[in-house]
Image (cartoon, coloured by chain):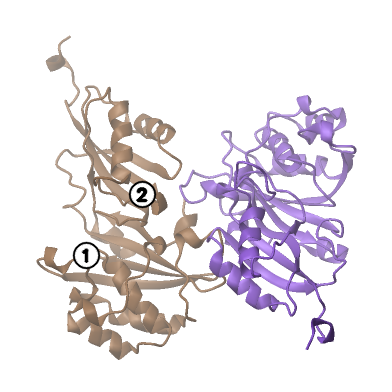
Chain colours: A purple, B brown
Amino acid sequence: MSLEETSYTPFERYFMEIAYDGTNYSGWQIQPHCLAVQEVIQKKLTGLFDRLPIHIIGCSRTDTGVHAQGFVATFLTPERPSIPPERVRKALNHMLPPDIRIRTIKKVPLEFHARYDTAGKAYTYVLNLGPESPFTGRYSWKPIHVMDVEKIRAAAQRLTGKHDYSSFVVERANIDDAVRTIFRIDVQEFGQFCCLTFVGDGFLYKMIRCLMGTIEAAGSGKLSPDDVTAILEAKDRSCAPETAPPRGLFLMKVFYDPAERDAYTLPCLPFLLS
Amino acid sequence: MSLEETSYTPFERYFMEIAYDGTNYSGWQIQPHCLAVQEVIQKKLTGLFDRLPIHIIGCSRTDTGVHAQGFVATFLTPERPSIPPERVRKALNHMLPPDIRIRTIKKVPLEFHARYDTAGKAYTYVLNLGPESPFTGRYSWKPIHVMDVEKIRAAAQRLTGKHDYSSFVVERANIDDAVRTIFRIDVQEFGQFCCLTFVGDGFLYKMIRCLMGTIEAAGSGKLSPDDVTAILEAKDRSCAPETAPPRGLFLMKVFYDPAERDAYTLPCLPFLLS
């Protein structure tokens, strides 16, 4: 039987939802002189498919130290017939280090694109408002100043909507258009942790960490809600406070359906979600 | 004014409650060729007290990779007058790596002994009964087999009481007497995690991890409650299943008052406790 006679599609596109602890990685995207999550997964996939080179397409970049619960990436299977998705998932998880886990794998249409087809993303930033702990320090930011959750809510409200977010962008030179829509910023408390969930159509480089720097200053009373609006309207990075550290940030979910995006709620602390 | 004329006690004993993520340490006790938590804290204390050598006395050893929420250690202050406890705590936390935190420091009588004066200890072992996660893998053990919490409870019940725990001891040759009392083993569920809290008068080297190996085998149905009792009564390590990994184990609390010990309940997941 020749390959032409098989009933299999020659290539298939596999869709993965990936969780990772970003502490020890230089983010998602492959870069020289450091270890990226993409590189780790690609190498294992290449090993799995008889050393045929596999290229993964990710839904976005994440910065050094940022975590993910639902990063989305796809790849084309080189084999015919392909290894079934669930077998690929189990084999990958067996080979990957414990700080990278493949949550799901499924087939999607060949023309599906992880980045261009998105209807939005949800990121959660975790603030620790209680005592420091050796166990949650990797996954949260403890601001130096005392925070008022109502002030955090008021600042978050001022930063929601469709705006030019130039005041909250690093490497402005590389960005043509800083207009984005943040549909909402949910503020939830879980014990001593305050979680801010940003649901938007897309986010610029370090944008959420820049926004969190301003929200932190507002939460501690250093900035009023009107100051926050003034910073947003200035469209100038130098007007905004410092960027928050990456360790509190989680890419929670990538949406390909606007209804799913609008219904999303953070169910629990990001690092407890299974 | 000479030193004799001061009203200060020449030396004072300071009592510390310490939390640490044991992942990157060879346990509490100083050993050659590896890094112990005791060594890290002692070096920082010595730096704080004008390089006068400080020796810390710990409440027990913990194994490589085991965590602590309430490890107790004491030391004698070399200075007169001493730096106040709260200042020592803040200075230490400033100098220590983020995976070691001093929760409290207070003065205790000079004759207080962290190890000999205990009324018991509470350890919690965390089982992950749900999907694997890159965030909680450092702090829990996910058994390969499906677990039944009622079978875990039944096994724990059989292992409670005053017994010769020789079947659950590693390095038996170094131990004169393997009789210990486990007052209770509380089994609590927090979402997908099952926490077993062992409250006892004292525990032998790797004893809880050995007990957890047997409880895991019972939880998956490989051992019946009567099998568990038979293993206990055999007083022979070779009769019991393998030792559970250290990453799920937390020293939660050291008691110096029997009433406090008897009232102790685990309030939440050990790695979420502040």
Residue under pointer 1: B204
**What is the residue that sits farthest to the front in this orientation?**
A2
Left-right relation of B106 to A141: left
From the viewer's side, name the closer residue of B232 and A221. Answer: B232
Residue under pointer 2: B25
Mark 2 surroundings: few (<14), some (14-19) or many (≥20) residues within 10 A = many
Residue A128 seen in render: yes
Left-right relation of A34 to B62: right
Residue at x 69%, y 79% (from the top left corner): A84
Q: Quadrant of residue B74 in the image?
A: top left
Secondary element type, mark 2:
loop
Q: Position of residue A76 (x, y in %)?
A: 77, 67
Q: Position of residue B58 (x, y in %)?
A: 24, 47
Left-right relation of B216 to A40: left
**What is the residue that sits farthest to the top in this orientation?**
B1
Identify the mark nearer the N-term, 2 or 1.
Answer: 2
* Quarter of the image with the N terminus of chain B in it: top left
Q: Callout 1, which amino acid?
A: Leu
* Disc assigned to residue A62: none
Left-right relation of A80 to B110: right
Residue at mark 1: chain: B
Q: Callout 2, which amino acid?
A: Tyr
Residue at x 83%, y 45% (from the top left corner): A160
Q: Position of residue B142 (x, y in %)?
A: 48, 71
